[in-house]
Amino acid sequence: MTALTVSGLRKSFGGLHVTKGVNLNVEPGERRLIIGPNGAGKTTLFNLITGELTPDDGSVKLFGEDITHTPARRRPHLGMARTYQIITLFARDTIMRNVTLALLGLSKSRWNPLMDLARQHHLTDAARQAIERVGLGHIADRPLAQTSYGERRRVEIAMALAQNPKVLLLDEPYAGLSIDERRDVHDTLLAIPRDVTIVMIEHNMDVALDFAERITLLHFGEVIVEGTRAEVVADPRTREVYLGH
Amino acid sequence: MSTRATIALGVALLALVTLPYWLTQIYYVNVASQILFYAIFALGVNLLLGYAGLVSLGHAGLFGIASYATAYLLAAGFGHTLSIVAALIIGLFSTAIFAALSLRTAGIGFIMITLALGEILWGLAYRWISITNGDNGISVHGRPQPFGLSLASANSFYYATLFVFLLCVIVVTIFVRSPFGAALKGTRDQPRRMTALGYHVWMIRFWACMFSGLLTCIAGILFVYYTQFISPQTVALTSSAEVVLMVISGGPATLLGPIVGAGLVVVVKSVVSGFIERWNFLLGAIFVAIVILMPEGLVPGTVRLWKLGWRKTMARRRPAVIAKTGEPAP
């Protein structure tokens, strides 16, 4: 059974057709890279998969279950987690609180108005673990405002990992990072176990190339090339889209 | 909680409990009662404004519904217990409708819808004369006697209000620290992310509205027993704006802020207005000063200045500390 199946997905904003019948089959445990130039519709595809946008046509299946009309807020409970290209964190809070909120989102106690959140040790311990996984254990209690851009990228990943997802969607996790920070994020991603399926968007092909097993090239809302790393790199259409000749 | 905070809390509690003994004039005891129930009102509005990031300009309408319901039922000859319980139920039911309509939006849209709903309620209070008695309002005779204790005197009413107030403060304190409180703050800062993390943002906001409505209705019932009179003026937009100003001037998303804000507004309105005819002008000037000097509100602003002063004092001492211990000061 495929982990994530996208069939005939379409989305238009007015007269602008952003996603034009995209098909995607991601196997369990696979590392899939979706590349494409600016405006190819990569983030829109993610928003359609996570339910933040409703597709005009087509379907999304998670491990065989049709989730096309499942509300976005239900999908994390089914094992789908995502990170954002534009960092979307709780800026007033500490790293710990950010990750704790991610864990709380899947816990029934998120509706509890009476108990003290700081004393829910099963949540705080798990949060600390997730933070250590991305190598930020030493600054776990630091307010987000006092962290660097690269650290925030890793907090994004920690929040997604804390939810123990089956399918992890990473939207340009390397965007805006220095070479050192890229290596840190890269190591973090390589350490994710194989029971997590990963779909990653990347604008810049070089950074994520050695991470991916299969690559999908998206251009103007359509899948142009799909195949193994070597196939896609060698394909003349890839050169055309990226280099213009 | 630090020792200093515990001591401060103890002193404040002692001051509140002994207030009728050091503020012997009945007038001032009554002002204190007013501050307390307006503080409950402000705590309720702060749940939305401070913790949910939703500014309501219609809360005086909910406050008024509870007041009117109590007054109407009492005037119709029902007992105190039944009138109070029924008023709470009617108030919460209205809050649910209020929330369902206004939570279709957030931000400016939410402000405008709550404003419109508040105005509708004001219009009803003014025009639905068969129930509200229009501009003449409804008078309430007598106060309840819980466990046989008469609340007729200023002091006994003050203690009853203080009891309810402390209860509300405790409940709000627990709520703010709870997972649900954390989730509510999350919907204020990053609603989109909260959805992606598996939270039902609408439902979280809805229950926050209900809790806010409950506190507002409790304040409304205390108000109608205090003044023993209710008229459309209580439901007017100015009342809604006033309580929003209490929260903003005191410090939104803090526990103490709305209470301090309520104290400020009530004192200027009822005490200072006896000495200065243009007290509205003074209140406006105070608000402007707060916005310029402490845009985050009186309570967080004071804390910030206090810490600044503390750090300066410590900085002056630091060389001596290093010399003595040989280690840098923390």
Image: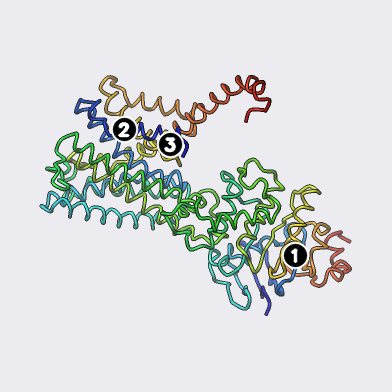
In the rendered structure, the answer to whether residue B322 lies left or right of residue B160 reads right
Circle 2: residue type: Leu
Q: Say what secondary structure mark 2 lies in.
A: helix
**Above or below for B286 versus B226:** above
Distance, label 3 to label 2, CA atoms, is: 27 Å
> Alpha-carbon distance for marks 3 and 1?
47 Å
Dot 3 falls on which chain? B
Q: Nearer the viewer, residue A160 or B201?
A: A160
The quadrant of the picture occupied by the C terminus of chain B is top right
Kindly give the residue lying farthest to the front in the view shown. B325
Across and down, in percent, residue B54 comes to 44, 47
- Residue A180 lies, with reference to residue A81, above or below; the image says above
Question: In this image, A181 relative to A243: left or right?
Answer: left
Q: Residue B90 sits in which quadrant?
A: bottom left
Give the residue at x 46% y 51%.
A116
Chain where mark 1 sits: A
Q: Residues within 10 Å of mark 3 (few under 14, many from 20)?
A: many
Local secondary structure at mark 3 = helix
Per the image, the residue denoted by label 2 is: B14
Marks 2 and 1 on same chain:
no
Q: Position of residue B62 (x, y in %)?
A: 30, 48
Q: Is residue B283 visible?
A: yes
Camera-side residue of B43 and A206: B43
Residue at left 49%, top 32%? B295
On the image, numbered disc 1 is attached to which residue?
A34
Task: Choose top left, top right, bottom left or bottom right for residue B11.
Answer: top left
**Residue B248, labelled with which disc?**
3
Query: Is residue A58 visible to us here?
Result: no
Q: Earlier in the sequence, mark 3 or mark 2?
A: 2
Tell me residue A222's x, y (percent): 73, 68
Look at label 3 and name its amino acid.
Answer: Ile
Packing grade of label 1 (10 A; few <14, some 14-19, many >=20) is many
